[in-house]
Image (tube, rainbow, N blue to C red):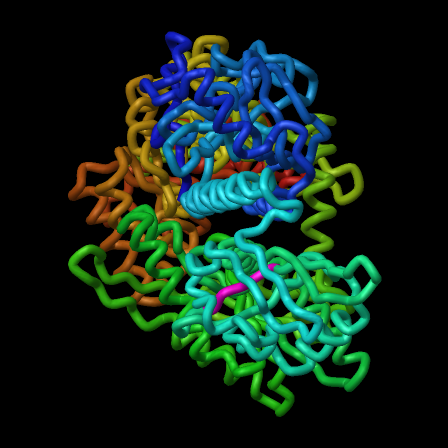
Amino acid sequence: MQMESGQVERGNAMDGRSGPATRRPGDARLRAELASLELVGHSPDPALDEIVRLAARITRCRKAFVTFVHEPDVFVLAGTGSDAKQVPAATSVCGVAYGADQPLIVPDLTADPRFKHFPYVEMEGGNRFYAGFPVRLENGFPIGTLCVIDDKIRPQGLTEDEFASLAHLAGLAVRLLECRRRDARFSDYLEIASDWIWEQDAQFRFTYLSPSADKHLLEVGKFIGKTRWEAPSGNGESPEFWADHKRLLEAHMPFRDLRFRCYREGREHFHSISGRPVFGADGTFLGYRGTARDITDIEMVNRELEHLARHDPLTGLANRATFETRVTDAFRRWQETGEEATLFLLDLDHFKLVNDTFGHSSGDRLLMETAERLRAHAGPQATVARLGGDEFAILEPSLARDGAIAEYAAGLAQAISVPVAGTQEHEGVECGCSMGIAVLPDHGGSFSQLMGNADLALYEAKTKGRGRFMVFDAAMRREADGRNTLARELVDAVEQQQFQLLYQPVVRISDEAVIGGEALMRWNHPVRGVLPPGAFIAALDGSRQAADVGYWVLEEACRTARPWALTAPHGFRLSVNLFSGQLRDPRLVNRVRSILERTGFDGRNLDLEVTENILLAPGGDLAETLQKLKLLGIAIVLDDFGTGYGSLNHLLQFPIDRIKVDRQFVRGLGEKVDYNTVTHAVVKLAVDLGLKVTAEGIETEEQKNFLALIGCNDLQGFHFSRPVAAARIAELIGAAEAPASALQAAAVATAASSSQLKASVA
């Protein structure tokens, strides 16, 4: 759920203006407002410091500030991540943001003509992302900002949760500043900032309260002649609290900012009192004189800050920091008492699909309902937390008996899977969950170890199909270490160009003439030898190098296949698989167009293959992107058809030209009637929709004959040829004019000449 810059004030970046006209105070009025706040030369305020720390942590930004603008400079009231105290307003983004009508969010400062030449932006490692919320006094006058700044560009701006939290924190900052202003007004008249004056005699009984006490419903008449603990204001603290205070008074000691709770008309209030003993000329103790003030607003703000620091703002559950504290406490209890605990880590399945289909408000509603169900299911001593997004966690200390963990997890899964009823404003939704489980202390000796192992178990649950729970075991850690090793080796493989391409011929079903080929990667691993795609493609597809490798594959294959396309007697179509990272790349269409231009390869001879898993969470513009690729003459092929989720919907939603029947269907042909029936239905559906059909994984003559009978157009598989090096493709193309047996003989000879290909899989 992202709050993009287009949803808030952006300040007409093209013409350099700062946005809609806003009410700015005149210089005289502004000076008066700032003077009343006593901001210039201010002392640090712990509450404001906590606000900026919370702002930075909630948004994961390096810097956060509360600022005020006093021309010609911007002053820092509170900050984290930087020692800056004062900067020129003319070269500060806050100098623009503070006067705006709405929050100013700039995903990339270097791309905004208003700010890209500011010193803190131009410098190496400088500011890149900015989000500033105006701070206005109760009278509407802007005085500064609450802002967060990061050194990384954020194209999507703020999430809705982050936006709402910053707006709330900005409001808290205003309340604190207004409290400061009220205190400042009294400081001119009283030595101690306060709201009323009081006096007591030598027996600590009130003899005077100033008339302003009546404004706080203290009813002065009920105080005169009584001590503070006998008066109505003494009803909120324990006898021990007042006994300590009495001992201080009896010692004739001055005191400052003694805070206590009291109740008036059923509502909780907080007072702060300061006093000093009064002595006569002869040294006789006469009593006390002091000041008092109502600090209820400040206490409420501090309580709210404390709650925000420890809880998730959307669901009210504990946040990650609080959850870490509770897990750390559980380790300490185990050391002291031997009491174990169990950590459950949950992800909602396909939550992004709920957001994309029903909208973010329905997604938020699902998260809040999930939180309520987790609370209801958890035991009284459990800690339930939202760690972020759709990730939740439970720490449950009461699952000692055998089978209790599985029973508990099954109950959680069942509770979450119940559909959330719809309303007039929201459609009903349902979402299952996947769960990873780790037991303290068996599965880790610290919070990070326990969470890491629960996360591995969650990963395993998702890998096995979601909607299930898995308990951590040591094999998961070994597999994870293997994945990490593979990821590091893939980085080296890209840098050292250890990849090569082979090509598997595609034949026309009517006469087995070679009419195309699919480019397939191999990894020349320096230790493990030649690796087929199944050993590394999944890891590569999830890496940041995937898009660049994908473009290399496309360009290398187009350059290599151009002569075949020009000379093959029956034409030649090149098939290349796209990585998911390429489909997420906004440069995809332009990059493909450039590759076609550089290599001279005709886009009308190119098939780009996408898998169904890539289409699962497509984003708003994937169909449009595929359509733009088709305008280059390219055909779009849906690979591994029938193995993913929502296959039929994909045929209608996306501009597909051809499907490839997955090898798992082909493998069962002739062995089970069900495979024949399903494969026949899939091919008939595609033909009825006007799509071409290629079947892959053909290994027998019987499979070929059946696929020819039901209407397949093209075939590929070991029955015709294994994947071969580029140098061998011309031989197979030349054999296309010979009888089918000649083609198969050429393919067998090619495979035999390279022992490294004997165990290859496409």
Is 270 part of what is drawn in magenta?
Answer: yes
> Which of the 4 quarters of the picture holds residue 39?
top right
Reply above or below: 329 against 159: below
Q: Residue furthest front?
A: 282
Can you say whether 276 is above or below 203 in the image?
A: above
* Residue 264: x %, y % from top left: 44, 71
Q: Which residues are drawn in magenta? A: 268-272
Residue nearer the viewer, 283 or 716: 283
Residue 478 seen in render: no
Quarter of the N terminus within the rendering: top left
In the displayed image of the protein, which residue is found farthest to the bottom? 401
Identify the residue at horizontal 78%, vertical 37% (top origin): 526
Residue 3 in sight in this render: yes
Q: Position of residue 138 (x, y in %)?
A: 40, 38
88 horizontally vs 577: left or right: right
Q: Nearer the viewer, residue 296 or 441?
A: 296
Residue drawn 36% across the image and 59% down it: 669
Q: Quadrant of residue 11?
A: top left
Residue 620 figure quarter: top left
The image shows a total of numbered marks equal to 0
Asked whether, in this view, residue 680 is left or right of residue 178, the answer is left
The answer to whether residue 459 is above or below residue 340 is above
**Magenta segment includes 711:** no
- Which residue is at a point 66% across and 69% down the rendered structure image? 201
The one of 594 and 210 positioned closer to us in this rendering: 210
As drawn, 25 above or below 287: above
Residue 73 position in % (x across, y down): 59, 17
